[in-house]
Amino acid sequence: MLSALEKYFIDDFTWSRPEGGMFIWAKGPDGLDMEKVYWKSVQKKVAFVPGKYFFTTKGEGIETMRLNFTMIDEKTIEKAIKILSEVIMDEM
């Protein structure tokens, strides 16, 4: 997933580099509403968790997302990240 993020996501994104676990935490440009991105990406069969649901203050974390990289093969992960990046570009 990390190499797919490097390949497809724009430079305005940052993400964690976990040494284990199940998730990558990513942050996009300020103001990019990941819930809107979520609903559009689900229509293309790609899902993630918008990060705002992990914050306690309304409006915080709107541009963040939690990506799960378990239980799926690398080819599918790359395809999903490519689709997700296309949805993000359409939203910007």
Image: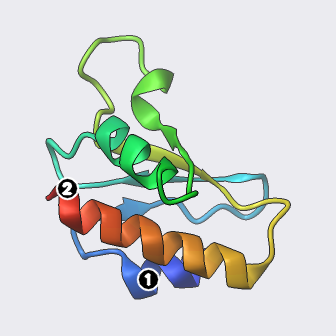
Seen at 37% across and 49% down, the residue is: 40
Residue drawn at point x = 33 percent, y = 32 percent: 61
> Residue at label 2?
91
How crowded is the residue under tag 1: few (<14 C-alpha within 10 Å), some, or many (20+)? some
Name above or below for residue 49 compared with residue 25: above
Q: For numbered disc 2, what is the local secondary structure?
A: helix
Way the structure is coloured: rainbow
User: The residue under label 1 is which amino acid type?
Assistant: Glu
Work out whether mark 1 precedes mark 2 in sequence or the reverse, and give the earlier one: 1
Question: Can you tell which quarter of the image residue 70 is in?
Answer: bottom right
Q: CA distance from mark 1 to mark 2?
A: 19 Å
Place of residue 35 in the rendered image (x, y in percent of width and height, measured from the top left): 36, 36
Q: Nearer the viewer, residue 46 or 3?
A: 46
- Which residue: 35% across, 75% down? 9
Q: Is residue 54 above or below residue 21?
A: above
Residue sitting nearer the eye, 8 or 56: 8
Q: Quadrant of the C terminus?
A: bottom left
> Percent x, y for residue 71?
85, 61
Name the element at disc 1: helix
The residue wearing badge 1 is 6
